[in-house]
Image (cartoon, grey):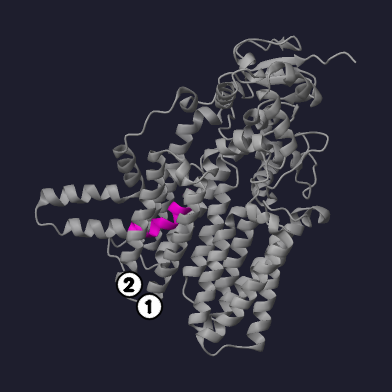
Amino acid sequence: MTAGPNISKRASRLILLGLWLATCAALIATTWHFIVPLNFRDPDDALRLVQVRDLLAGQSWFDLTQHRIYPPEGVPMHWSRLVDAPVALLLWLLNPLLGQALAERIVLVAVPLGALLILALLLYRINRTLALSRAASLLAVAMLFSTLSILIQFAPLRIDHHAMQMIAGAAAMLAVVSAPRSDGRRGLIAGVAMACWLQISFEGLPYAVAIGGILAASYVYRAERWADFQDYMLALPLVSAALLVGTRYPADAMIPWCDSFSPAYLSPLGVVSLLLLVGQKLCPGKTPLLRAIPLAIAGGAGAALFIALSRECLAGPFETLDPIVYQLWYLAVREGLPLTAQKLDLQAIIIAPAILGFVGTAMAIRRADEPRVREAWIVLFAMQVMAFLVALSVMRAMGFAHLMSLPGNTMLVVMLVAAAQRMKVATARVLGTSACLLATPIGASWITAGLIDEEPANAAGSAVPDRYRCTTAGTLRGLDALPSTLIYTPLDIGAHLLVYTQHSVVATGHHRNAGGMKTVLTGLTAPTAEARAIVTGSGARYLAFCRGENEIARYTRLYPRSLMADLAAGRTPVWLEPVAMRPGESIRVYRIVRPAD
C-alpha cells in the first residue's frame, strides 16, 4: 500500500533493534537518578516490588494479600501474579549471583525495557499485516519510541501492570487484523490475549467486548468466519477461569469482586458462550439476520444474568467508597479521572494524536487495494474508536489509545511526505517534508499544547512530590532502625515505607483497604484534639509524613485546623513526641503517646 525505501527483512530487524537500543539508552540516562537510589516515582511500582519480595520470601503464589497493610487483616490485592512472574523469576535467578540490591536494579530496568521491545515487534507486525512497507512499519516503531504516553509505562522501575496490558492488547489486535483463516486461530490467540489482560486488570473489559463484537460482526457478514468467533468466545472464559483458579486460593477465586475479573463477570460470560454454541448448532443461520438472532439472545441472557447477580458492579468499584476517601483520594488521582477533569494542555496531548490517527486510518481504508487489507483497517478503526472513548473517560488509558492510532499516524505521515516530495521547488520540498513532523504523535502533542495558554498550576499542585527526596532507602535508615511496628502515614508514601523499611502501615492508596484509608484520612484531617482518638485507635506506634508532599499540601489547604495542618506548621500536640532521624533524613517521625488507661 505504501512505497518507500527498499529495506530487506534483515536490515529492518537491525534498524528496529537499533531504535530500541537508542531508546533504552535515552530512558536509562533520563532516569538514572531514580535507578541508582531505587527511587520509585509511583507507589504502585513500589508496592509491586513488595509483593514480589514477599513471594520470593515464601508467601504463597495463591496468596495475594498484602499483610503489611492494615494488619492483622491485611489487604486482598486486586493485582495479578502474571505481572509479578517475570520480575520474580529474574530476581530468583540473579539474587544469588549479584545480591539483592544490584539484582533488583538490573531487573527493574530490564523488565520494562524488554516489554518495550516486545511491544515494538508487535506493532511492526501489525503494520506489516496492514500492508505497510517495512520502511513505514519502522517509522511506526520510531513514533512508538517517541510517544510519551506510551514510553512512560515502559520506563525503568515501571513494573506495574500498564505495560503488560498494552502488550496483551497489541497481541489481540495483531490476531484480529490478520488474514481470515478457517481454523479459528485468530480468535483463539485474541481470546487468550484478552483473557490475560482481564486477569492483569479489569480495564481490559471494554476492549474484550469490542473484539468480541468485531468477530461477531465478521461472522454475521460471512458465515465462514464462525470458527474465529467460536474460538474467541471459548478461549476468553476458559482461559480466564484457568488464570483465576491458577493464581488464587479457591475461596478467594470465588469472591465476586467488582474491580477484577471475578465470577461476577465470568458467570455471565460463560452463559453467553454456552448459548452461542448451542444456538449455532441448533439454528445454523443461512442469512445474516438468522446468524445475528442467536447472538442477540445470548447477549441479552448474559446481560440479564449480570444484572441479576452483580447489579452492584454497575456503579463501578469506586462509587461505594466512603465520601472522605472518594473526595480526598480518588478525585486526587488525576490519571483515573475523565478527560474533562484534566487541564487543557493535557486534553490536547490526549486528543491530537488520536484525531490524526483517525484521519490516517480513514485514508488507508479509502486507498486500500485489497478487500482483506481494507477490512483489516476497518477493524483497526473500530478499536481506535473504542480506545479513544475509554481514554476520554479514564485518562490513564490514553497510552493504549495512542498505540492503536500509530498505524493511522504512520499512514498519514507517509502520505504527507509523499505529497511534499512531489513539490517542484526544492525549498518547498524541504520545508514541506520537515513540516510532516507535526503530524507525528509527539509533534501534534507539542504544537497543540503549545497553542494553549494554560494557567500555571498553584504551588501545591506543581511542586515535585517530596517523597522523591524524603522516602528512599538512603533517607529512611533512621525510620527503618526503629523496632518493627505499625506506622500511621499519609496514603501516598505508605507503599514507599513498605519497600524501604521493615514496618507495616495503616493504609496505602489502594481502594480495597477502605477501612484503613478512612482511618488515615479522618485522622489527618480532623482537629488535633479529635484526631488523637482516631490515631491511637489505629494501633500504630509512630506517625510519619513528608512535609513538602503534595498530599500534605492538599490536606492543609482544605483543612487548615486539622492535625495535618498543625504538624506541617511545626505545632506538635502533647500526645506526639518527635523522633530524631539521622542527618539528611527529612521525613518527620513522631512516637504516639497513648492515653493512660
Asked if residue 34 is positioned above or below residue 66 in the image, the reply reads above
User: The disc labelled 1 sits on which kind of residue?
Assistant: Pro
Q: Is residue 45 visible?
A: no
Identify the residue at image location x=57%, y=73%.
Answer: 185
Asked if residue 427 is positioned above or below residue 524 in the image, the reply reads below
The x and y percentages for residue 126 are 44, 63
Q: Residue 296's image quarter?
A: bottom right
> Is residue 132 found left or right of 498 in the rendered image?
left
Q: Residues within 10 Å of mark 2 (few under 14, many from 20)?
A: some
The x and y percentages for residue 141 are 40, 53
Residue farthest bottom in this picture:
286
Q: CA distance from mark 1 to mark 2?
A: 7 Å
Q: Residue 206's image quarter?
A: bottom right
Identify the residue at image location x=80%, y=33%.
Answer: 71
Q: Residue 453's image quarter?
A: top left
The residue identified by callout 2 is: 368
The residue identified by callout 1 is: 371
Mark 2 element type: loop
The x and y percentages for residue 464 are 50, 25
Say which of 196 and 597 sits in front. Answer: 597
Q: Residues within 10 Å of mark 1 (few under 14, many from 20)?
A: few
Q: Main secondary structure of the magenta part?
A: helix
Q: Which residues are magenta?
A: 399-410
Q: Is residue 280 visible?
A: yes
Quadrant, the C terminus = top right
Mark 1 element type: helix
Say which of 438 and 540 sits in front. Answer: 540
